[in-house]
Image: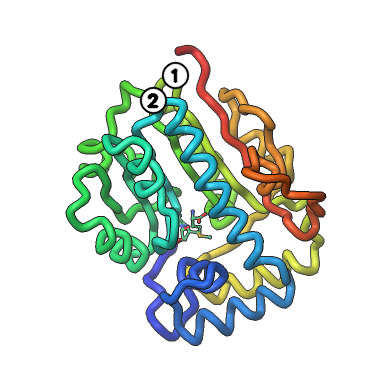
Amino acid sequence: MRFYAAGMDKPSMARMYDYYLGGNHHTPADVAAAERVLVAVPTLKEIARANRAFLRRAVTELTAAGVRQFLDIGSGIPTAGNVHEIAQQHAPDSHVVYVDIDPEAVAHSNELLNGNHGAAAVQADLGDPASILEHPEVERLLDFDRPIALLMLSVLQFLPDTTALPAVRKLRDALPPGSFLALTHPATDALTQGPRDTVDTVYRTTNAPTTTPRSRAEIAALFSGFELLEPGLVWVPLWRPDRDPGPIDPTIMPMLAGVAVRPGR
Ligand SMILES: C[S@@+](CC[C@H](N)C(=O)[O-])C[C@H]1O[C@@H](n2cnc3c(N)ncnc32)[C@H](O)[C@@H]1O
């Protein structure tokens, strides 16, 4: 995949996401691009927050289910409630590897992880899954003979089918029975073509080569060979909410979430 570090005067997908979340690792170029996206999808800040809330709930549940190994791909610039903080709070022996294509996101993560022996952040491309599976830090921290939770939240839309589908297949195949796959993904079912076109146009000015929102059926197919846990593939606030989220309008929250298990253990 064509990728370059965004630099300071070019918007970056990781820093734009940091802006949506109210973080402080972004530049005026990121803000300008993010504001253009927000005109097309005015609820994007709420979507980003709901996505992070799903991450917290999913990692909490997976830790409670006994998972002690997490591979978070497309992990982004660290913000409140990162996987290692949630997992190690519940189970201090948890191991976590963060993977991002963006060296800046990886540098921020490693700064935060300094001294944490159970977690590391590495730079790799999801489009080249062998480079993730064979990465020395992944081999050091994760035991592929024991269950692993593979997290890919709000990242697969940055890969076209030609790379996303074989990559997801290879990663799924590498996970032993009893492993979990957690995904969030924007859904075309709830995003009309106009906003999709604007989002794509803006992201093409960033370090994302393309955007590929997918339909509910296409997102469900990413879990192939795995069994979705209750409540299935749902709009992100509806996945095991802490409190009643009230009625959800998918056009306001067009992000699907699901967690699935690889059977056979
Ligand atoms: C929208 S952010 C999501 C961050 C985090 N997963 C979350 O949901 O809060 C997308 C992240 O995916 C990363 N990313 C995009 N394409 C990638 C690729 N091919 N391989 C690895 N990371 C990628 C970006 O750099 C960015 O940090």
> Which numbered circle lies on residue 98?
none
Q: Is residue 73 left or right of residue 197?
A: left
Q: Where is residue 234, by image quadrant?
A: top right
Q: Are marks 1 and 2 in contact (CB under 8 Å)?
A: yes
Q: Is residue 169 visible?
A: no
Earlier residue among tags 1 and 2: 2
| SS at circle 1 | loop
Q: Residue at x 60, y 28 (%)?
A: 224
Q: Please, what is the three-letter code of the amino acid marked with disc 1? A: Pro
Q: Nearer the viewer, residue 132 or 128?
A: 132
Coordinates of residue 236 in the picture (x, y in percent): 66, 47
| SS at circle 2 | loop
Q: Is residue 62 left or right of residue 69?
A: right
Q: Residue furthest front?
A: 243
Q: Is residue 199 left or right of residue 25?
A: right
Q: Where is residue 240, by image quadrant?
A: top right
Coordinates of residue 201 in the picture (x, y in percent): 65, 73
> Which numbered circle lies on residue 147?
2
Coordinates of residue 35 in the picture (x, y in percent): 63, 80
CA gap, disc 1 and disc 2:
7 Å
Q: Residue at x 47, y 39 (%)?
A: 60
Q: Residue furthest top?
A: 264
- For disc 1, the marked residue is 177
Which quarter of the rendering shows the N terminus? bottom left
Q: Is residue 172 visible?
A: yes
Q: Is residue 144 above or below residue 134?
A: above
Q: Nearer the viewer, residue 32 or 248?
A: 248
Q: Residues within 10 Å of mark 1 (few under 14, many from 20)?
A: some
Which quarter of the rendering shows the C terminus? top left
